[in-house]
Amino acid sequence: MLLTLQVFCSLIGWLALYLVFSLSQRGPEWNCRLVTLTHGVFIVLLTAYVVFIDGPWPFTHAGTENTVLQTQALAICLGYFFFDMGWCLCYGSEGPVMLAHHAASISAILLALTMGKSGCETCATIFGSEITNPLLQSRWFLRKLGRYDSLLGDAVDVLFIVLFATVRVGVGAVLFYHEMVSPRPALVTKVGGVVMYVLAWLFMWDIGKFALKKSRGKYKRWADSRRTDEGKMDGCCSHKGQKRLLGKIVES
């Protein structure tokens, strides 16, 4: 009963924050992304404390009983995912992969809360999944404000790709391995781990295609700009040569 109340209060809290942001009259997606950004920053800080300070260590204690702080972090995160899933379904803004990610996240958190176990690796998964979220939202806001095509936009993209590849895919692989070999986590929890890691690779595939496309575009613009500069230089040199030749003819 207390757990249900915690999740419900979390849901109401995120909904209330959305309504507060709606006072700016920027539009539903703008307001929802502000909520997502707020949740991303807050939950990353909270789960970082849970994983790295409060403990236990998820690589060695997968499948152990949840601590009070782990339960609270999971309840807060679950309330947010209920809110965001409802918003996405209402506005139809996300594709099947993102909806599958939300559904898998909700299922994994529900499992950890109802069983009272595997909270440490679930919090670690949330930390790895959400650490890139603020960058993703920042990219969207930069685009809307017309400041994406800048050094700041490039820095956000590079940092997002590096963090996703190293933390969510790289460190995630280590966590996934320890989850699979540990005898403590339930079979259904291990299946959930497989689903989440497969989704991470699907996102990584899309990110890789985006990075390749953007790199090619950047190189093409650089090459075109260089050719244009060389053409101007050649034209300038040719013009100066013609003036010198004309001067010599006049003198003779």
Image (tube, rainbow, N blue to C red):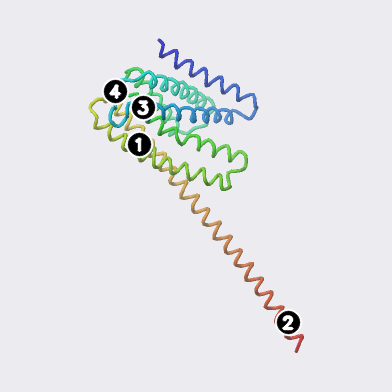
What's the distance in space between the residues labelled 2 and 3, CA to CA? 80 Å
How many angstroms separate mark 2 from mark 1 (CA)?
72 Å
Q: Residue furthest front?
A: 53
Q: Sequence-wise, which precedes: disc 3 or disc 4?
A: 4
The residue at which mark 3 appears reads as 122
Q: Is residue 77 above or below residue 204?
A: above
First in sequence: mark 3 vs mark 1: 3
Contact (Cβ within 8 Å) of mark 2 with mark 3? no
Question: Which residue is drawn at the image coordinates 45% and 12% (left, top)?
Answer: 5
Query: Residue furthest toward the bottom?
Result: 252
Near mark 2 (Cα within 10 A), the count class, few <14, some 14-19 or many ≥20, is: few
Q: Under tag 4, what secondary structure?
A: loop
Residue found farthest to the top: 1
Q: Secondary structure at mark 1?
A: helix
Q: Which residue is mark 4?
A: 64
**Tag count:** 4
Q: Is residue 17 left or right of residue 104?
A: right
Quadrant where the N terminus is found in the figure: top left
Residue 161 in the image: state x and y as whole percent.
Answer: 45, 43
Please tell me which residue is depicted at 62% across the width and 39% down the height of the picture. 145
| Mark 3 or 4: the one toward you | 4
Q: Which residue is mark 2?
A: 246
Camera-side residue of 68 and 135: 68
